[in-house]
Image: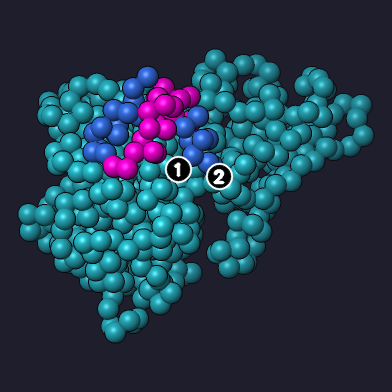
Chain colours: A cyan, B blue
Amino acid sequence: MARGAQTFQQRLTNWACQPSLYQPPTAASMARISLIDTVACMHSGAGERQSVVMSQALEASGDEGRVQPIGGGRARSLYGAAMLNGTRSHAIDFDDYEIPGSTHVSAPIFSALLALAQLHDVSIRQISDAWVVGFETIVRIGTALGYGHYDKGWHATATLGPIGVAAACSRLLGLEPAQMAHAMTLATSSSAGMKSQFGFDAKALHVGMAAEAGLRAGMLAHVGATGNIDIWDAPQGLMEMYGTPSSMGFDAMAETMREGEATQAFPVARKFWPSCSYTHRVIPCAVALAGKIDDVAAIKRIRLRMPEPFHRVSGFGAPTTSNQARFSAVYCAVVGLLNGQVLPEDFTIQKFSDPVRQHLCGLVELDLYDLPAVPPDQLLAMTPERVSVELAGGHGWNTKSGTYRAAQNVP
Amino acid sequence: MTADDVLDKLAACGGSREGGGAFLAASDLTALSACTLLSAS
């Protein structure tokens, strides 16, 4: 065990509860930009059906209060507003994410913080510090569990998200390290949600539920509720229950953990397109080919080569719903080829039900391959996508390959 | 993604680009005043 027998949890909470939070100089700016990005997503998602059904469910349950959800509408209870903020923030899958844990990180955290902030007079600096704590918590847990946790089928935003939200809310509430530890372990009791829900309303609802669950855990710890804080590497703990044989675990992860520096080591990635992040490598390939196609009627075949586990996440074909369109690498490739760009309106029923688009989706052949056995930090760079198009009367395939670049680095 | 890109995204999503710029430049604000700045159109 690292650093004088201190556990991962002790080190994390001791750092996270410092009066003056140690963080890289860029972290506060990153938090502000992520706040803008998340609020934008809340606004754009407010009218989507997932947000509407969440509002209706809150209304039907008699939820009311004095916390205003971001994006408008009736004031809600603290937990109701957090759930609605979270659902809105993820309704069109446009919000940011982090790599080690494969989670949408800012949406659940800010959804809870912006609700809690209405009951406490807090500054943006306090909100920013709380986001840094939540981000760090999720990245470190994600590193300990590894990609296998997500690949196995967990929607990591719904499993790791509540724990990060609990830590962030604990910071905002000014809890002591021991209280924050209890908030985090209480939040693990709400770590649930599977990737099999992708393409359905449930995915965005997961984010609302993660925000609410983490916030509730923080509030419970604030008034003295406790849980088993020996929850990480212990028998029947998070590692054993949610990890895989390839997970490094928390003690091993802590050997190289530098508290406070996750935002620098693993910068947040922001989205240019409102679709699954695994479509974001396909889209630039397709867009690059668009200029070479004078007549879409001449397209004979489209071939899409990508890693099988990534396609499993974005595996819908010709979409029949907006949610499916966002999780269809096939559809996103077709739109990129057709228009040379992908826009938010491309995920409306008027666009995805267009007969030309549906026909082209049917021309896509998949060429899926296994992930290479490389260290996790090299995985995304070693897994290229390729879009190829064969035109009638043409001279073979036009091909464009691309590898992963985090959205923050795309010019 | 640059700060400018994020402000463009805010405007495209129905928020206030000018408010976003003011938010980035402000030394400090309350959370609620920040949300008001970002939301006003």
Q: Are marks 2 and 1 in contact (CB under 8 Å)?
A: yes
Res A384 visible: yes
What residue is rendered at 41% in x and 63% in y?
A: A261
- Specify the segment rendered in magenta: B9-28
The C terminus of chain A appears in which quarter of the rendering?
Answer: top right
Res A160 visible: no
The answer to whether residue A400 is above or below residue A67 is below
| Disc 2/disc 1 C-alpha distance (Å) | 9 Å
Tell me if A345 is positioned left or right of A23 in this view.
right
- List x then y, in percent, for residue A248: 44, 72
The residue nearer to you, when weighing A43 against A50, is A43
Quarter where residue A33 is shown: top left
What residue is rendered at 61% in x and 28% in y?
A: A342
Q: Residues within 10 Å of mark 1 (few under 14, many from 20)?
A: many
Identify the residue at the far bottom of this view. A4
The residue nearer to you, when weighing A107 against A243, is A107
Residue highlighted by disc 2:
A407
Q: Is residue A184 magenta?
A: no
The residue nearer to you, when weighing A410 against A102, is A410
Quarter where residue A113 is shown: top left
Element assignment for label 1: loop
What amino acid type is highlighted by mark number 1? Asp
What residue is rendered at 38% in x and 32% in y?
A: B22
Residue highlighted by disc 1:
A96
What amino acid type is highlighted by mark number 2? Ala
- List x then y, in percent, for residue A311: 59, 45
The answer to whether residue A304 is above or below residue A369 is above
- List x then y, in percent, for residue A324: 51, 31
- List x then y, in percent, for residue A158: 34, 48
What residue is rendered at 66% in x and 59% in y?
A: A382
Q: Is residue B18 magenta?
A: yes
Tell me if A144 is positioned left or right of A227 in this view.
right
